[in-house]
Image: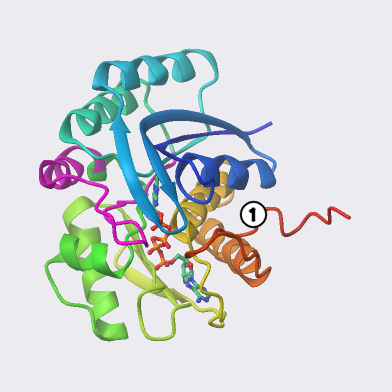
Amino acid sequence: MKTALTIAGSDSCGGAGIQADIKTMTLHGVYAMSAITALTAQNTTGVIGISEVSPEFLGQQLDCVFKDIPPDAVKIGMVSSGGLIEMIADKLKEYNAKNIVVDPVMVASSGAKLISEDAISALKEKLFPLALILTPNIPEAEVLSGIKIKSDEDMIEAARIISDNYHCAVLCKGGHHKNKANDLLYVNGAYRWFKGQPINNPNTHGTGCTLSSAIASNLAKGYDLISSVGRAKDYVTGALAAMLDLGQGSGPLNHAFCIHSE
Ligand SMILES: Nc1ncnc2c1ncn2[C@@H]1O[C@H](COP(=O)(O)OP(=O)(O)OP(=O)(O)O)[C@@H](O)[C@H]1O
Ligand SMILES: Cc1ncc(COP(=O)(O)O)c(N)n1
């Protein structure tokens, strides 16, 4: 069985973060492991508390995983401080981790800030250079590229700037852009669109976490980067199109849409 590790925050309502990642990896037939960076108290209406682990404890979790069951792919999500990011970068280098997918989570869809300013520079300096692919949404791509994104051409230019700076592939997600369903992959100096039909579903909590862990799952299974992105996009589309409606705010996806429970 192929294996994958998520390094991310726990989401008490189960739709994003570690919980979304473990569901996604499991539904891909991949054995899921976790190293938790922070506990969040949140639901579909917002985040009310964040309790970070210490860098030392995160390091212990990573040692336990890598020394025992080395993952075939690693997904990194919410990491809210510079010290945690440095620890992750040191351990990924120490264990020569492969197939690293970084989702530079900055703000929750409910509006809560999930990262400190010092962590953004640590992400750029320490973690991005280790990544195979970064998966920013539009606001994150604006912060990382330094340009405003208003058009499809701006998405291409932002992804190019980020890819050139950190020497990795960049998937600029279009959920915050006009038609909501078109993502742009920039890799090795060329771009490719992954287009979808916009789904009229306000319940999008965790779409970004789900997409990045689906990419990691497919990489773990041996698919190349372009196939992994295409397959991950199809999975998110299916989970969104299943129209699960839970909670009072922007609810979670149905990660198990492909299993019929009745
Ligand atoms: N209404 C929609 N219809 C179809 N696909 C969508 C829709 N909204 C988002 N997506 C897809 O979901 C994925 C995540 O995109 P998005 O830009 O929302 O990321 P994000 O902001 O990181 O997500 P999150 O909601 O977890 O913060 C992308 O593949 C995007 O195309
Ligand atoms: C622990 C954790 N990680 C990531 C997100 C972002 O996901 P979303 O933007 O869908 O709320 C989140 N809300 N919580």
Quarter-of-image position of residue 165: bottom left
- Picture residue at 36% right of the left edge, 57% below the top: 135
Residue 100 is situated, as x and y percent measured from the top left of the image, at: 40, 41
Is residue 259 found left or right of 7 in the rendered image?
right
Q: Is residue 221 visible?
A: no
Q: Give 79 or 42, whichever is nearer the viewer.
A: 42
Q: Give 129 or 32, whichever is nearer the viewer.
A: 32
> Which quadrant is home to the N terminus?
top right
**Residue 132 counted in the magenta span:** no
- Picture residue at 18% right of the left edge, 28% below the top: 83
Give the magenta range: 99-127
Is residue 226 found left or right of 91 in the rendered image?
right
Residue hosting label 1? 255
Q: Amino acid at mark 1?
A: His
Residue 147 is situated, as x and y percent measured from the top left of the image, at: 14, 73
Residue 159 is situated, as x and y percent measured from the top left of the image, at: 27, 67
**Residue 113 counted in the magenta span:** yes
Quadrant assignment for ligand 1: bottom left
Is residue 244 found left or right of 58 in the rendered image?
right
> Which quadrant is home to the C terminus?
bottom right
Secondary structure beneath dot 1 equals loop
